[in-house]
Image: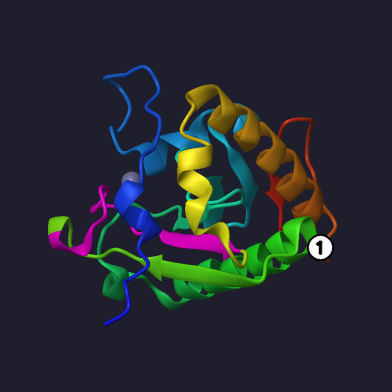
């Protein structure tokens, strides 16, 4: 039996200082951060957004996340489903243009612990670009400083690629790309 590929087992999202007035869900807090670049929100449409994973399996590892809080994928309404799906397509296009991967892994963890995910109450889809022979990537970047610098590079490359898509606008410096 082949080994199952599950980059979401290493999922981790950096927490901001806790604000008791705000919902404690990071996937609700990060798009409201006010500085998309600092929050690593790289693109959005009117119902979903794209977040760089802070512990990437590979450069360009992102999550596509509906704005609406909730862990039940089957409860999403049609408009949210379509906006989320369309943003996944645009994310694949942007990653293709930004870094020319050989392949992608994309998937969700639903239902908590047994699925291998660490955030179970807000739906998110991982999109991981893959290159032939990339399986030894994590040990190479085990130094935290290297990972952080890599995230800045990934953000810039991906932001530029999203901004070049049809219908994209960049509302302000350091703001996420807005997509139709
Ligand atoms: Zn949430």
Q: Is residue 43 above or below residue 32?
A: below
Residue at 26 percent across and 19 percent down: it is: 20
Between 18 and 110, the one lying in front of the other is 110
Q: Position of residue 69 (x, y in %)?
A: 33, 52
Residue named by callout 1: 165
Residue 65 visible here: yes
Query: Which residue is outermost to the bottom?
Result: 1
Q: Is residue 56 above or below residue 36?
A: below
Res. 73 image quadrant? bottom left
The verdict on residue 123 being magenta is yes
Q: How is the image coloured?
A: rainbow
Residue at 23 percent across and 58 percent down: it is: 116
Residue at 47 percent across and 45 percent down: it is: 138
Q: Quadrant of the N terminus?
A: bottom left
Query: Which residue is outermost to the left?
Result: 114
Residue 53 visible here: no
Q: Which residues are magenta?
A: 114-130
Q: Position of residue 136 (x, y in %)?
A: 49, 52
In the picture, measured across the screen, residue 159 lies left or right of residue 55, that is right
Res. 90 image quadrant? bottom right
The verdict on residue 89 being magenta is no
Q: Position of residue 75 (x, y in %)?
A: 28, 71
SS label for mark 1: loop
């Amino acid at each position: 039996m082949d080994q199952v590929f599950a980059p979401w087992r290493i999922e981790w999202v950096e927490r901001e200082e806790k604000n008791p007035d705000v919902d404690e869900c990071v996937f609700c807090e990060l798009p409201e951060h006010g500085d998309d670049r600092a929050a690593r929100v790289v693109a959005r449409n009117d119902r979903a957004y794209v977040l760089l994973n802070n512990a990437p399996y590979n450069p360009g590892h992102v999550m596509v996340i509906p704005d609406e809080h909730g862990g039940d994928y089957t409860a999403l309404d049609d408009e949210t489903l379509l906006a989320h799906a369309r943003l996944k397509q645009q994310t694949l296009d942007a990653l293709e243009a930004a870094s020319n991967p050989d392949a992608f892994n994309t998937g969700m963890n639903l239902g908590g612990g047994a699925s291998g995910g660490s955030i179970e109450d807000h739906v998110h889809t991982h999109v991981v670009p893959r290159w032939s022979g990339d399986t030894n990537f994590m040990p190479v970047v085990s130094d935290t400083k290297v990972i952080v610098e890599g995230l800045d590079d990934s953000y810039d490359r991906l932001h530029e690629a999203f901004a070049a898509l049809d219908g994209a606008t960049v509302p302000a410096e350091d703001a996420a790309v807005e997509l139709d």
